[in-house]
Image: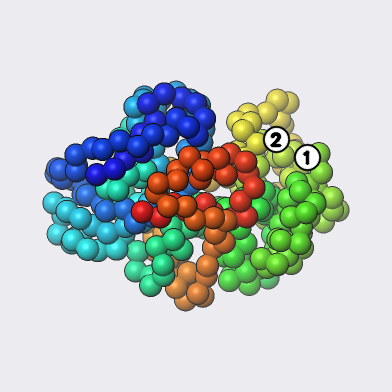
Amino acid sequence: MQAIVVKEAGGPSKLTYEERPLPVVKAGWSLIKFKAFGLNHAESITRAGGSPAVKFPRVIGIEAVGVIADSTSEALPVAMKVMTLMGEMGRQFDGSYAEYGLIPNEQIYPLEIDLPWTQLATIPESGYTAYGSIKLSKIKAGQHVLIRGGTSSVGLAALKILKALHVRVASSTRRFEKLAFLQAEGADEAILDQDGLLQTSDHYDAIIDFVGSKSLVDSLGHLKSLGGYITVTGELADEWSMKDFSAFMIPMGSYLTNFQSTLVNRTWLEELVKLIADNDLHFPIGAVFPFTEIVAAHELLDSGQANGKIIVEI
C-alpha cells in the first residue's frame, strides 16, 4: 500500500510517499481501507515539528472515513462504512495519510449516511468538534450565539449545525472580504474581528471561540451575565496560554469552559450523524485533492485561504 510519511520536521515538501506492507489485524484492532480524510491545523503543526510527543518517521492524520477491510470484532464486519478520529491516531501510531490504517476498535464509529466520501470526510473532526462545543455551551433554539473564528472549517460546521437547531448566529472573521461569504453560508450576522476586537456592541447567550487565548478577554466582554456560556475550542492563533487572566473577567453567573475532541463521546457522535441525516446538512468543502497531491493540499492548508474543509480523496 501507499503511505505518506513525515521523516523529518519541516514544510509540506516533507510529506513523502512510501510503499509499505498491508498492516495485519491484531486483537482489539481493525484494518480500515481509507476512502478520504480531512486536513487539520493540528497536522500542520505536527508536520512542522510542533508536537514533541510525535516521533518521526510517522504517518500523520487524525481522522478518516472508509470501510472495514479486516477485523477481529464481529461488531465491525468487512465492508461496513465507518469513520475514525483522534485517540493517538497519527501521533503514537500511524494515522490516516495512507491507503489503509490499523485502528483500535474503540475509536471506530459507524457512519450510516448516504453521501459522497468527500462530504463524509467533513464530519469526523470538524463536525464532531463543532457539535461537542455546542453541547458544552448548553445552546437552545432561539438563542443568540457567536462563533469566533467563523471561516475555519470547524466554525463553518458549527454554523450549519446551529442553524439546523434554530439558533440566531453571528460569525466573525478577521478578513473584511470574508463577511459576505459568511452571510452566504447562513450567518444571520457577519462580524469583523479587527486587531482582536469584535466590531460590535452585542452580547451573546453563548460564544464558541475557535481563536482561543488571544481573543478570550474580548470574547468575555461580549458574553451575557447570568447563564451565558463561553467554550474555548482550539487555538487558531497558536497561543496556548495568557497572562494576567482573572476569573472576575467572566461575567457574573456565566461560565467558561473548553472542548477537546481528544475524548470522543459516542452518544454525541451518534446524535451528530442523525442531525446531519435528518437535516440534509452539508459542511462546506474548500478544496478536494487526490491522494497524489498531498504537498499541494498542505500548502493550501498552511495558507489559510480555503473556504471550508480541505479533503484528500483516495
Which residue of the protein is positioned furthest toward the front in this rendering? 292
Q: Are marks 2 and 1 in contact (CB under 8 Å)?
A: yes
Amino acid type at image mark 1: Gly
Q: In x, y percent, where is residue 77?
A: 18, 61
Tag of residue 27: none
- The residue tagged 2 is 214
Amino acid type at image mark 2: Lys
- Give the residue drawn at x 63%, y 72%: 166
Image quadrant where one finds the N terminus: top left
- Give the residue drawn at x 17%, y 53%: 70
As measured in the structure, the alpha-carbon distance from the residue carrying label 2 to the one carrying label 1 is 7 Å
Mark 2 vs 1, N-terminal side = 1
Instruction: Locate residue 181: give its quadrant.
Output: bottom right
- The residue tagged 1 is 196
- Give the residue drawn at x 48%, y 69%: 276
Answer above or below: position of 55 versus 3: above
Answer above or below: position of 123 versus 293: below
* Mark 2 surroundings within 10 Å by alpha-carbon count, few (fewer than 14), some (14 through 19), many (20 or more): some
Element assignment for label 2 = loop
* Mark 1 surroundings within 10 Å by alpha-carbon count, few (fewer than 14), some (14 through 19), many (20 or more): some
Residue sitting nearer the eye, 260 or 306: 306
